[in-house]
Image (tube, rainbow, N blue to C red):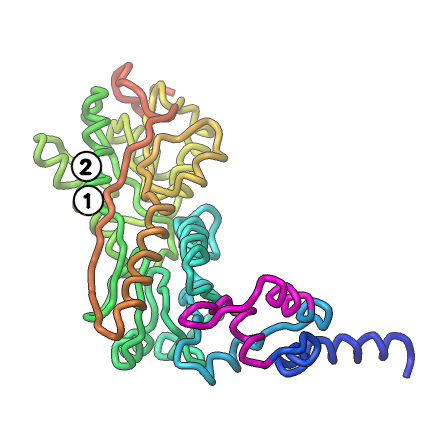
Amino acid sequence: MGCEEEKLEGQRRRSSVTLKEVAARAGVSKSTVSRVLNNRLGDGFSVSLELQRRVIRAARELNYRPNLIARSLTSTDSRLISVFGGAEALGKFGNIYQTAVNSLAASLGAAPENFDIIVNMSVQRPEASELPFWSISGAVVLGRCSSVTMAQMEMAGIPYVVINGPCGGTGCSVVPDDIDGMQQAVRYLIELGHRRIAYAGPLPGYPAGHSSLEDRRRAYLSELASRGLSAIDGHEETLESAAEFLESSVLEQGATAIVAYGHMEGLNLMQAAQGLGISVPEQLSLICFGDEYAFNVMSPGLTFVDLRSEQMGRLAAKLLLRQMRSAGEPRPEVVRLSERLVIRESAGPLRQAPLESGGL
């Protein structure tokens, strides 16, 4: 056997170290090793600090790695939390799920149960189950999961929480209040003197059926109507071309302000405005929805409706912990999280008459 083969064999042996071997090295029982490494002291079981250090030292010397799947198969409490929907939800820069998952993981990591979190990044067929073969203590759904997965979680009594999406009868969900967020944006623009306000919908490819699609558009229409103002044509369409949208809404229909569905739509509109010679915010005010992290790295600063994704993650963790600690009794709840308007440089007072196509 050559040096490289010996190295690979050594790595293989180190990766398959058992709890029994750690116990033999430390001179204690397997149950003691398990309790120490899994931080499950108490309930009448205690060991000295010196013994704890000896167990941990033995595990490090042997490069012991616990088998999470095996642990879940032999325990009624696996302390594994599975996150569904990662492939779709985490694939775009600066969306709310990245911040929400970071916040969720930090909150769950601080819990005394010492949970392990597994994010499912695989692309699933709509009719497929996303539940793993091993047992889990709880689940987190990012936006949505398959109807099969939802039905199985409900039937099996698995505690779960949905971030920015609907839940079933026994689960919990945390969703941003998009209606209130749109009302804040439109009211702010009206206070600035704008009366011709357009709404730019999502880019093509956004998952159909999400509540934000209709909530934001309908709130836009309702808020304008309540002030006796007319909507700008194009609010029901996807943003196929930012330049064409600006030509239609601003140059042809006289819009002086736009509320955009999200930060990518806002960026596209800002770049297209520059290409058309439309100055932001001097000639056009712009507001969009999104996650604070995405807007912190943009320049110039976009005024935005903060979906408060960090708070969303913390609330989701709190609800999931409550579900998992409720001894099998479901406590379903839907929390609608208020949004907040963050004022930056892209929106300003109405300073001149609406632009016309011949005026540039």
Q: CA distance from mark 2 to mark 1?
A: 6 Å
Above or below, 232 relative to 27: above
Q: Quadrant of residue 21?
A: bottom right
Q: Range of the magenta residues?
A: 29-57
Mark number, residue 261: none
Residue 34 percent across, percent down from the top left:
54, 75
Q: Is residue 27 left or right of residue 49?
A: right
- Can residue 315 be seen here? The reply is yes
Viewer-nearest residue: 57 or 321? 57
Which residue is identified by label 1?
A: 179
Which residue is identified by label 2?
A: 183
Write the residue at 63% across / 72% down.
65
Q: Secondary structure at mark 2?
A: helix
**Quadrant (top left, top right, bottom left, bottom right) of the N terminus:** bottom right
Q: Quadrant of residue 55?
A: bottom right
**Quadrant (top left, top right, bottom left, bottom right) of the C terminus:** top left
Viewer-nearest residue: 114 or 4? 114
User: Three-letter amino acid code at disc 1?
Assistant: Ile
User: Three-letter amino acid code at disc 2?
Assistant: Gln
